[in-house]
Image (tube, coloured by chain):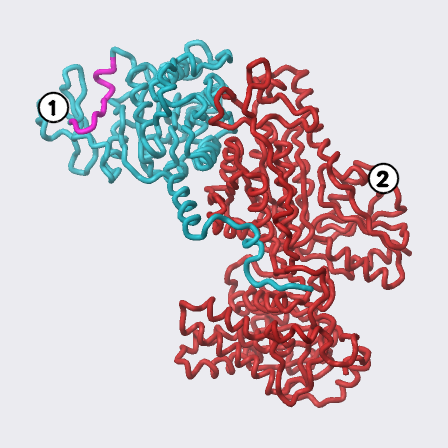
Chain colours: A cyan, B red
Amino acid sequence: MSDDTSTATLSRKDFQSDQEIRWCPGCGDYSILAAVQLLLPDLGVKPENLVFVSGIGCAARFPYYMNVYGLHGIHGRAPAIATGVALARPDLDVWVIGGDGDMFSIGGNHLIHALRRNVNLTILMFNNQIYGLTKGQYSPTSEVGKVTKSSPFGSLDTPFNPISVTLGAEATFVARTHDLDRKHMVETFRRAHDHHGAAFVEVYQNCNVFNDGAFGAITNKEHRAEMLIELHDGEPIRFGADAELGVALNRFGECEIVTVADVGVDRLLVHDEHRGDPTLAFALSRLADRPTMPTPIGVFRDVARPTYEGEVQRQLVGAADRQGPGDLEALVGSGATWTVD
Amino acid sequence: MSSLPHSARVQAFQGDDPMMGLARQGPSGRVGTRGGDGGSGPTDGDEQRGRVSPKTDHLEPEALEDVVIRFAGDSGDGMQLVGDRFTDVSAAFGNDLATMPNFPAEIRAPAGTIAGVSSFQVHISDHDIVTPGDMPSVLVAMNPAALHANIAELEPGGTLLVNSDAFDERNLHKVGYQASPLEDGSLVAYRVIQVPMTSITLEAAKPLGVKPREAERSKNFFALGLLSWMYTRPIDPTVAWIEERFAKRETVLAANLAAFKAGYHFGETAELMENSYEVAPARLEPGRYRNITGNLALAYGLVAASQQSRLPLLYASYPITPASDILHELSKHKNFGVRTLQAEDEIAAIGVAIGAAFTGQLGVTATSGPGVDLKSEGMGLAISLELPLLIVDVQRGGPSTGLPTKTEQADLLLAMYGRHGEAPLPIVAARSPSHCFDAAFEAARIAIKYRTPVILLTDGYVANGAEPWLLPDVTALADISVPFASEPNHDGEFWPYLRDPETLARPWAIPGTPGLMHRIGGIEKEDGTGNVNYDPANHEHMVHVRAEKIARIARELPDVAVDDPDGASLLVLGWGSTWGAIQQGARQAREQGTNVATAHLMHLNPFPSNLGEVLARYERVLIPEMNLGQLSRLVRAEFLVDARTLSKVQGVPFRASEVEAAIEEMSR
């Protein structure tokens, strides 16, 4: 989505606002903000055509730090507000920023409906598995047994798996990345942005105050090779320091971790982002049910489907072609009329 | 022949023998007094309007000034459909009219039960009228339940037309009749006409090869045909309408047509009554008219506001009775550039509209009942963002699910105060079905000019009710457009909350505008820069500024008009849909020699500037409301006026006679 050559001279600084950033020192949000601001000059989109919409939560402060058009909305409603922005103005480049509470608790309904409608939105969900802004209650992605201020005896709630939920919500693009790998973030965000339709990215984000190290077991540099399974389209899914491990389907169609030497390369699952049926992507999303097990990152699914606002536009144009432009006088005088002299 | 006084006419009829189980007691409707030619309406235009006069040995149709007819049956009987049809034909004929549909929330309650009764009341007249009539003078009852539910409201001496086929033991039993009311003498006060509508309809459809089960469903058209004869309605438009409406279902079309004609011919030949009746066209203000419901007028008003503001309309809503028809209507008009979205919930709907407003479009959402509660959060955001937004509240009976299909005016204080924090917004109310057009346009104008959410209050009664509408000259509608910000406004910077000194509206800079990128949100912000700001003094300043912005709207509102022909000491103040009943109640009181003034509010927040002065002029103030006194509270609080409430919360509008009685009582 390139506007014209005038965007060629843009740099990271052009997307930074003059507002002081108020996230806690050491918060994972800083690196996500940096990744987005690094990416934007590359996208060829003028700052005035970018709109960042957010709800409520730490992540939702994001738009204030961006020198673009921004709307900091209400808790959970960002996908709905952003749907209005995109529907009204398909020419705009609309991003949605929120956390796990914002998008999977209070705003869960709006998220799934924006996804199924395939509104052209780039949705970044910062998952820190905790409520940060309200100072540390368990979230809809917190693990069972989580001890927090509101769950002193351990949380009883089964968490959502955001990738599974969004695949189930008919999302056309679903990906995962994490806040300790800027390069992976930038590339994942780029893919999400380039996707025409609703793109959902789960970003594992460390909350160093209320849930420090929640993803350390998989995202720390020393564990990454064994614990992060990078997905690459068209390639057998392998990981490990020497790519000695892989993912294969068992006889139930479920994904399981295998040792390549034991099963042979041919048994490995070949990743296919573009598969119309989401079954395999879903199976991959179930490989790890918490971030202490080998966890796939990258693009799970990227399929083409007409965008909602594009189809709305098509109906408008079609109606205007068929009926001609609206004539208010004819409209109010439609149906049976009579004249009193 | 129609110059006999009403009482004399009743006498004249009472001597007749009942025939086919019918007891004649007099004509239904008010007898005309405009001379003895029997058809006192304009004669030249009648043929052009397709009026069919019964050409039999019957007497000429007898002129009536007006008549109130109520069609009542099972919710599956198609009463709304034939009521609408009768209304449209009467409108095109040139009568003034007002309607009141009344239907259950259940789509199909058990057949034959009281809960399943659906009715449609229409008041047609040869003069200017403002209400659907207090009590019907003609009741069409398709079954015992419809009779049971409505008979108490039929005018004494009124005509009761029943489908006698439906009065079998089973149906009678369902509503608790021990004996058939058609036979036990309980209906002697009425002129009862029994017609075996089902069997005649089946008979009529027989040669067409329609299955009896299907043919039976056409009996509503039989009733419509019969009423069309009784009140000399033109039949050609209805025949054409049936042919168009059922074009795709050949057998249904044929059965409906056969039933309609059978009903009409039955009236003509069965000698049910000496003559048919005629309600001549009304002498309304010259111009072109159509019949319109409130929801339809409101949808048109939104399209008009979109055109006159040059802002594309984006309408997002969640289906809810009785607001859904606005969505249905607007979704048809894509060639006007109208985008509609059926949202996943009420909250999303207002969110989508806010998003659209941020980008420079006319964002509108509509709802009712509990949906309004859910939108409070979004309204608060729009107040803080200071973006134009229109929220339509088609009020219905509450609390909670309440009475989904019935009317009430109990959301005024909710509209006024139903948000956390100090969160003022303007409120506009529509007084009648056609007025919904003007009210929607005005609400949008205020929203756009002042960059504020506006609540437009209508209710189930005006939303579903219909009346003739003198078509507006759309070329004369005001230009309500505002410029978008295009340049930095403060030392080369853009400050999103730097206000217009007159209106206090903030600049509307839309995405896509170079150099004006800005961030807004629901967190308190510094006036001017719009930056997040928690400073105590700034918050206090912002609370006052937001209140002052709304208050200043009063500067440009027209004074509230007072209708006071006789120098009364009693003022009846109203708002919203009570307008018709108040007008008619006051007319009747004046006819009785009671002096009374009336005034009606379209703007509830802020009030028109002269309201306090008007109220101070009167010794007594009466406020009829379909709530427990919400405008009264506002008026008392604002003006220290000892206003008295006339309250009605039955899910049905005031009768003019109820307002009249209150006026008489307060005038003693």
Left or right, residue B50 beside residue B132:
left
**Residues in magenta?**
A223-235
B139 or B575, which is in the foreground?
B575
Residue B16 location, x and y as percent? Answer: 73, 89
B112 or B360, which is in the foreground?
B360
Quadrant of residue B129 in the image?
bottom right
Regarding mark 2 in the picture, which secondary structure is present there? helix
Left or right, residue B43 beside residue A333:
right
Residue beneath the point at 61% across and 61% down: B291
Residue B286 in the image: above or below residue B424: below
Left or right, residue B450 beside residue B219:
right
Which residue does the numbered mark 1 point to in the structure image?
Answer: A260
As drawn, the label of residue B613 is 2
Q: Is residue A98 visible?
A: no
Mark 2 and mark 1: span between their CA atoms? 90 Å
Residue A29 location, x and y as percent? Answer: 41, 16
Query: Depth-wise, is mark 2 or mark 1 nearer the camera?
Result: 2
Callout 1 amino acid: Val
Callout 2 amino acid: Glu
